[in-house]
């Protein structure tokens, strides 16, 4: 699993994704083991990052589902969920707070 996470984050990093964060959600009562969040430089870059992931992970990962909007793409790899968002969407939806609370065992904590 560690190698898979590293490969995904390397693909994102080498293609100019920013603020890449990995959340370990194993044993946290969530539907995936890991979530990865990355910021794009804009809507076109969001789509380009998805294309890079598909190309560079071909044969290694099965893309179960991809949900695309111009500002936010979610890639479901089964046990890993990848969120690629424009900076504006990343601030607006603040997935980090939710995933951090979940990873820390504070999923019921509404003070975040």
Image: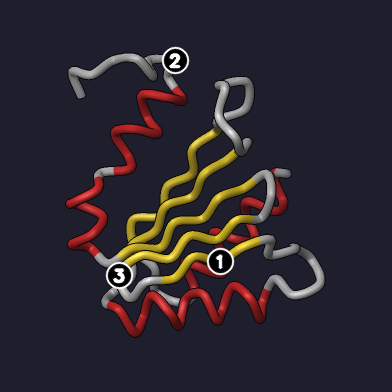
Residue in the image at 32% along x and 43% along y: 95
Residue position marked by numbered label 2 in the rendering: 105
Q: CA distance from mark 2 to mark 1?
A: 28 Å
The quarter of the displayed image where residue 62 is located? bottom right
Contact between marks 2 and 1 (CB within 8 A): the answer is no
Residue 31 image position (x, y, % from top left) = 60, 35
Residue in the image at 79% along x and 65% along y: 60
Marker disc for residue 48: none
- Left/right of residue 25 with respect to residue 1 in the rendered view: left
Sequence order check, earlier mark of 3 and 2 = 3
Sequence order check, earlier mark of 2 and 1 = 1
Q: CA distance from mark 3 to mark 2?
A: 29 Å
Marker disc for residue 71: 3
- Left/right of residue 1 with respect to residue 80 in the rendered view: right
| Tag in front: 3 or 2 | 3
Q: Residues within 10 Å of mark 2 (few under 14, many from 20)?
A: some
Q: CA distance from mark 3 to mark 1?
A: 13 Å
Residue position marked by numbered label 1 in the rendering: 66
Residue 56 image position (x, y, % from top left) = 67, 76
Residue 57 image position (x, y, % from top left) = 70, 71
Instruction: Establish if 14 lies above or below 110.
Output: below
Q: Secondary structure at mark 1?
A: strand
- Left/right of residue 15 with respect to residue 11 in the rendered view: left
Q: Residues within 10 Å of mark 1 (few under 14, many from 20)?
A: some
- Left/right of residue 74 with respect to residue 64 in the rendered view: left
Residue in the image at 44% along x and 70% along y: 68
Sequence order check, earlier mark of 3 and 1 = 1
Q: Secondary structure at mark 3?
A: loop
Instruction: Establish if 41 lies above or below 108.
Output: below
Residue 1 image position (x, y, % from top left) = 73, 44
The quarter of the displayed image where residue 105 is located? top left
């Amino acid at each position: 699993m560690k190698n898979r996470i590293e490969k995904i984050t390397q693909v994102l990093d080498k293609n100019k994704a920013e603020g890449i964060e990995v959340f370990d959600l194993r044993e946290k009562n969530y539907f995936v083991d890991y979530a990865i969040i990355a910021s794009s430089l804009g809507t076109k870059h969001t789509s380009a990052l998805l294309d890079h992931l598909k190309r560079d992970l071909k044969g290694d990962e099965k893309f179960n589902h991809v949900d695309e909007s111009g500002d936010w793409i979610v890639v479901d790899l089964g046990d890993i969920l990848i969120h690629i968002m424009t900076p504006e969407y990343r601030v607006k939806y603040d997935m980090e707070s939710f995933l951090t609370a979940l990873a820390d065992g504070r999923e019921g904590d509404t003070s975040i």
